[in-house]
Image (cartoon, rainbow, N blue to C red):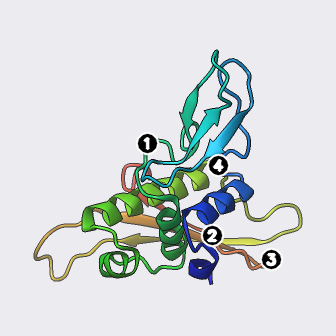
Amino acid sequence: ELCTRLSDEDTAIRFLQEKGILHQQRLCTRGHAMKLTVERNGKAPRWRRCRKAECKTEVSLRTGTWFEGLKLDFRTAVLFIYSWSNDYCSTKFCSKELGLSTNCAVSWKRLLREVAAESLLSNPLVIGGPNCTVEVDETLYAKSKFHRGRRYPKQWVFGGVCRETAENPSLCLSRTVVAGR
């Protein structure tokens, strides 16, 4: 459905503007309203000031947004983000369906993991509260079969469940964070 909705780059740009990811309006450094231009000669879309002689400022559409510094076209980026969020982001899938190179797919997966981690850190999960019962448990994961082979770092996993709301967050911590264990 999303592929048909985002049939070309222009519709992808409008979609991102509707979602508040790209600017819908822009002012130049002199405070003039800028106009969005999308040229068909392969150049990237950009904000352009009206053609007055005193101000012909041009600004990339990506400037000041999450897409600043990224080179992937907007349509492919939206489709990749959608695929990643639905667990369809194997390198083979990205190459075949989205036309991405292996390096590009790996870089974008890393970028989205960083965005997800940053979002979780800035918006922590809180469970429980007044008149709520929360059950908490801890588990130590350490892969070791018969004390042979490669040693893996220990990973503490803390989980909880709120009896009243059935919220079920979990948290992974490295060995250094859990002192004395």
Disc with the residue nearer the chain's start (3 vs 1): 1
- For the residue labelled by badge 2, is the local secondary structure a helix, a strand or a loop? loop
- Residue with the mark numbered 1: 69
Disc with the residue nearer the chain's start (1 vs 2): 1
Q: Residue 165 carries which label?
A: 3
Q: Residues within 10 Å of mark 2 (few under 14, many from 20)?
A: some
Cα gap from disc 3 to disc 1, whole angstroms: 42 Å
Question: What residue type is disc 2 on?
Answer: Pro
Q: Residue 60 carries which label?
A: none
Question: What residue type is disc 1 on?
Answer: Gly
Camera-near label (3 vs 4) is 4
Question: What residue type is disc 3 on?
Answer: Thr
- Give me the residue at 58% from left, 37% from top: 64
- For the residue labelled by badge 1, is the local secondary structure a helix, a strand or a loop? loop
Tell me whether circle 3 and circle 4 mark residues in contact (CB < 8 Å). Answer: no
Task: Classify 97 as above or below 111.
Answer: below
Whole-percent x, y for residue 98 in the image: 40, 74
- Give me the residue at 18% from left, 67% from top: 151
- For the residue labelled by badge 4, is the local secondary structure a helix, a strand or a loop? loop
- Residue with the mark numbered 4: 22
Cα gap from disc 1 to disc 2, whole angstroms: 34 Å
Q: How crowded is mark 3: few (under 14 residues within 10 Å), some or many (20 or more)?
A: few
Cα gap from disc 4 to disc 2, whole angstroms: 32 Å
| Observer able to see residue 61 | yes
Task: Classify 73 as above or below 47.
Answer: below
Q: How crowded is mark 1: few (under 14 residues within 10 Å), some or many (20 or more)?
A: few
Q: Residue 169 carries which label?
A: 2
